[in-house]
Image (cartoon, rainbow, N blue to C red):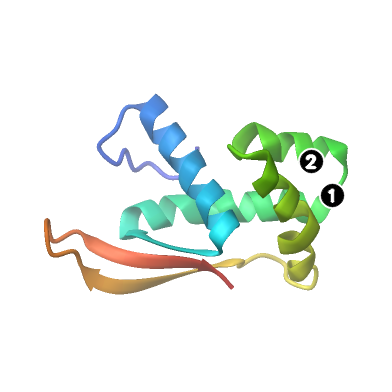
Amino acid sequence: MPGTRKLGKTSAQRKAMLRQQVTDLLDKGRMETTLFRAKEIAPMAEKMITLGKKGGLPAYRQALAYITREDVAKKLFDTVAPGYAERNGGYTRITRIGTRRGDAAEMAVIELV
């Protein structure tokens, strides 16, 4: 797993949370979360897009092993990844948006470029 941030969770909880957030990001294209979660999500989302660009059944199965919904994996391989055919990485952008009112956590928007 990339990074060393524990995000206040056990390793199983952290892995499940990151898988779900990567799935949501690939589905919607944009999401608002804390800055540190966004920094953990970005490399995994980029890896999934790279698998989508690769194409083929082995790459599709690798993506399905991480992405939690099959319709999102199909969308990744059919529409999202072909849009990045000319790019060699840098598929995500993290923009800071200030602090959250409840606990003053630094918030960010992560989106597909």
Assign a secondary structure to mark 1: loop
Task: Give left or right: position of 1 versus 97.
Answer: right
Task: Assess whether mark 2 and mark 1 are in contact (beta carbons under 8 angstroms).
Answer: yes
Q: Is residue 102 left or right of residue 8?
A: left
Tell me which corner region of the image, top left, top right, bottom left or bottom right, holds residue 7.
top left
**The disc label shown at residue 55, or none:** 1
Give how far across and how far down residue 60 sits, in percent: 78, 40
Q: CA distance from mark 1 to mark 2?
A: 6 Å
Residue 2 position, x and y percent, is 49, 43
Q: Residue at x 11, y 58 (%)?
A: 102
The three-letter amino acid code for the residue at tag 2 is Ala
Image coords of residue 52 (percent x, y): 76, 52
Q: Quadrant of residue 29?
A: bottom right
**In the image, what residue occupies the spot 68% across and 39% down?**
70
Say if 90 sits above or below 49 in the image.
Answer: below
| Residue 97: % across, % down | 29, 74
Which sits in the foreground, 68 or 54? 68
Label 1 environment density (alpha carbons within 10 Å; few <14, some 14–19, many ≥20): some
Residue at position x 79%, y 64% in the image:
82
Do we see residue 2 in this rendering? no
- Amino acid at circle 1: Gly
- Which quarter of the rendered picture does the C terminus lie within? bottom right
Mark 2 lies on residue: 59
Please tell me in which quadrant of the rendered image residue 98 appears: bottom left
